[in-house]
Amino acid sequence: MNKKKTLTDLNDSIEQIDFSVEQFRQGKKSFYKTVAVQLRLLLCDVSGRKSLLKRIFSQSAFHPLRGNLLTSLDDDLKKSLVFYSPALINFDGKGGTKIESLFNINGKPLFLEEWLNQNLLSLNINIGQLIRSVADKEGAHSDPDYDETLEFTNLIRISNDSSHSQYIIAIGEYVSSQLKIILSQLKEEIENWKKISYII
């Protein structure tokens, strides 16, 4: 594996997510598609190939979704649940909205596979499915039809935006922030290791 290229790809992906989130916040709504493609590249295995993050870290972990509503509901109530969001939705009073506190940063981190399998928006959708659907149907390709995931998320609107666009942006913001923290810590560890090696 070309480690230098892989690290460059990681940094480029974070940069594209940050830029696209900023553009989305400024009203250029189509940029959520770029975020979804970068999230798929970073987090999702495709056609038997490991995701970029798995190539760098054999075990990656992220914080769980905020709240535990689904675990506290009995089966009958779960069946009647139409829409599920553990996030806070901030309405700015000017028509703008922002998904906030989607993830519990004080919760015990989950390994990537379990993290991607968390239900979001409905019992039939998880984080991984949402990312793949947006990336595959709208971001990396222009499929003529939506899949079941996007048919559902298009019905749930948040200030005239599809719910999937808002949640992809929130996921992108979270993943980018966590990866920057990890890379910052790794940089410090490498620099400290170099100093110790030099002293010895």
Image (tube, rainbow, N blue to C red):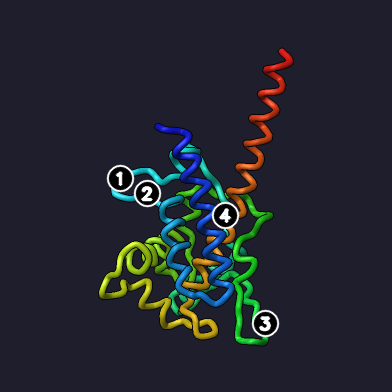
* Front position in the image: 33 or 151: 33
Amino acid at circle 1:
Gly
128 shown above or below 73: above
Residue drawn at x 53%, y 52% as measured from the top left: 14
Q: Position of residue 113 (x, y in %)?
A: 45, 50
| Picture quarter with the C terminus | top right
- Quote the CA–CA distance across marks 3 and 1: 43 Å
Q: Residue furthest left?
A: 144
Amino acid at circle 2:
Asp
- Quote the CA–CA distance across marks 4 and 2: 18 Å
Label 3 packing within 10 angstroms: few (<14), some (14-19), many (20+): few
Residue 45: give its label: 2
Amino acid at circle 4:
Ser
Q: Earlier in the sequence, mark 1 or mark 4?
A: 1
Element under disc 3 = loop
* Front position in the image: 77 or 194: 194
- Quote the CA–CA distance across marks 2 and 3: 37 Å
Foreground mark, 3 or 1, reads 3
- Quote the CA–CA distance across marks 3 and 4: 24 Å
127 shown above or below 158: above
Q: Is residue 177 visible?
A: yes
Q: Which residue is mark 1?
A: 48
34 shown above or below 112: below
Label 1 packing within 10 angstroms: few (<14), some (14-19), many (20+): few
Residue drawn at x 43%, y 45% as measured from the top left: 52
Q: Which residue is mark 4?
A: 176
Foreground mark, 4 or 2, reads 4
Q: Which residue is mark 3?
A: 92
